[in-house]
Image (cartoon, rainbow, N blue to C red):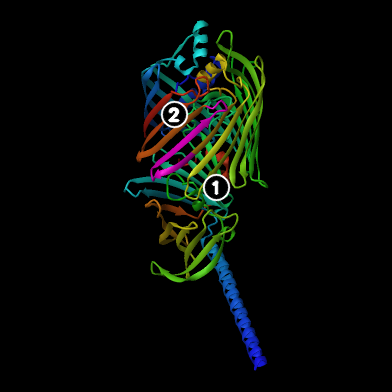
Amino acid sequence: MQRDSRATRTKQLIVRLAVAGWMAESLFTATGSAQDEGALWLQRIDAAERIPYSYGVMRQTITTSGGSVRTFTIRTWSAENGDVSLMTYVDPPRVAGDKILQLQGGDDFWYYMKRRDVTRHFAGHNRRQSAMGSDFSYEDMATGDLTEDYTAAVLGFDEVDGVETVRLRCTPTESGPSYDHLVLWASVEDNLTRKIEYYDEQHHLKTLHLTDFHVVEDRKVAMKLEMVNHREGSRTLLETVEVTFAEEPDPSLFTQAALSRRIPGD
Amino acid sequence: MIRSPTRERTSSTWRDSITVMVLAGLISAGPVSAQTLDISGYFENTLQIDYTAQTKEQLLNAAKLRLDFSSSVSNGLEFTGNINFIVNVGAIERDIRPYLPDAAALALESAGAATTYSLSGSRTFLDNAYLTWLAGPVRLRLGKQQLSWGPAYSYNPTDLFHRKNLLDPTYEKEGVTAIRTDYRWGVGGQLSVIAVPNEDFASSGYAARFATHIESIGYDIAVTAHRVQDSTAIDPTTLRSTMQRRSALGVELSGELLGLGAWLEGNYNWMQHDSDFTRFVLGIDYTLTDGTYLLAEALYSGRSQLDRPYALGDWLANLYFGEPIGTGWIMAGIRRDISELTLASVYLFATPDGSLLVNPRVDTSVAQNADLVLFGAFTLGREDGAFPSGLYSLLCRASVYF
């Protein structure tokens, strides 16, 4: 009887271990597959959003929690699939002529202040600072590859603005941005990002909404990007006034030497 | 705080002629460029209130109009410049004795030296005016221009052409008439050669800077060399500015260390008459995830007397030329947004003699093209320390841009 009892307990233990092992394996497989799938989605999004080169005019409107509004007009150039870009402020006069140069996919930024003829280098932690008082930080503006900056896991599928999207949890790599994680929604149909939520360890900090998609020169792009800052209660809207992907900008624009010189059309 | 007069500069026909050439270049561009000449600028009103126990409050109001001009003269050739019109009203003549220790003030009186200085009631000057010629990676710049170097915030040992105001170190500085050539390559690669003409080649200023970015460690590194005419020392006998040749070899380094931003800027100076000295700044900074910016800097200066009581000449060099007094300071600062359009910061300067300067500041955007800045300082320390107790200063600056 005792022996039977011992045998039964042993069988039960073996069964429990087997079940536990199977569950652990299933869980591991599920997590692994979510991550593999996440990586695939990041690749698809990178491919869909990769723009070899561009030129555009943007209008940036910052609205504070108190309702004050500041509007900027910016000309932008990008090349090398977004690894390099130059922004020059056209308006208002307070900042006209100031420029922001991005190199190496957003690892390095240089900010040129025209009136003082001084250039500041933003790298590492400095990229967390707000760009010109907006709700975008320098690292938010970085246009490097998602696959280099994040690992991703698929959280599910949702509808955003009437579009079926995949919901990804993106965790920065060691060389990635400073956020704890992002939740990103991208269209299942065209793989273009529709919404991003930015989190630190405890808080939901900001949400980026990408809307008003138009086809320009056979390329579908969001004409409005709005960053809502949940901590400050402010928001920054970036509207595309003009954009073209037809002509590759002069490579000399993406150099520090270009910061202190007039750009044709300024 | 006392606002010391600008560094004395020797008049120079060379420098004048370069500025005239630049203006002539712009004018001769005439009707062609008239349509492309951009004019912008700002009006700024600064009310400054200084207080010491001896002087009580002293008010100074500075109204400044800055007009900026820029034009593409032709392909690769540009003109940039600005004229400043400044009107000072109020306490434009200041007694410097309240800013000196008693012993130094007595020494100044007994030497029969001037105990006051005056700001001009009005000043109109060409702040910057230069022609830039660009040919690929080469840039040649002629005229009155900015020559600022160095990554440090509060003080730049490798910048021998400009001086910073400790209470407002990021404020614009008057240009220097010079001939400058830059050659740039890659990310951060730059060779600059500068000549600041004076009466002859021997008394002219020369500088060179070689900079590069070392990608493997993520550091910007630069080596600087200067040979200039220096007027920032005071002769202890005559209590007048000493003109002497100054040669300097410097280094600049900035990058990341253990996740912190880190920089080193310093040089060794060989002086014609005074003792040679070393001066450097070490700094670190960090941005928290909420955007709060933290900064610390340490300045070592081996030029002035290292311990109290500091020499009268050192005090006067400090007041008139912004030269550090004593061995330097340790500075700690914090800056963060207190609302979407308002940035607040506080900087603390502590010296080895135990004295302290506190420099709070608020910058706010009051309208699309209007800013308001409120900043100032108060001091805490021994009567003969670098920052003796009892000095107060408050500045309110309103600016509108057009």
Tell me where residue A86 appears, x and y as whole percent: 51, 46
Instruction: Label 2, secondary structure: give it.
Output: strand
Query: Which secondary structure, mark 1?
Result: helix
Screen quadrant of the N terminus of chain A: bottom right
Q: Pointer 1: residues within 10 angstroms few (<14), some, or many (20+)?
A: many
Alpha-carbon distance for marks 2 and 1?
29 Å
The residue closer to the viewer here, B303 or A138, is: B303
Residue at position x 54%, y 27% in the image? B354
Residue at position x 46%, y 39% from top?
A: A97
CB atoms of marks 2 and 1 within 8 Å: no
Chain ID, mark 1: A
Q: Chain of mark 2?
A: B
**Would residue A209 be counted in the magenta stretch?**
no
Residue B337 part of the magenta-drawn span: yes
In this rendering, the answer to whether A46 lies above or below B105 is below
Q: Is residue B402 left or right of residue B287?
A: left
Q: Residue furthest left?
A: A67
Residue holding disc 1: A125
Which residue: 44% across, 46% down? A74
Identify the residue position indicated by label 2 in the image. B377
Query: Where does the image place residue B126, in percent across and percent down from the top left?
Result: 46, 23
Front residue of B146/B140: it is: B146
Q: Is residue B284 left or right of residue B71?
A: right
Q: Quadrant of the C terminus of chain A?
A: top left
Residue A199, percent from left and from top: 47, 58
Q: Position of residue A196 (x, y in %)?
A: 46, 60
Dot 1 amino acid type? His
Above or below — where is A28 with respect to B155?
Answer: below
Q: Which residues are magenta?
A: B334-354
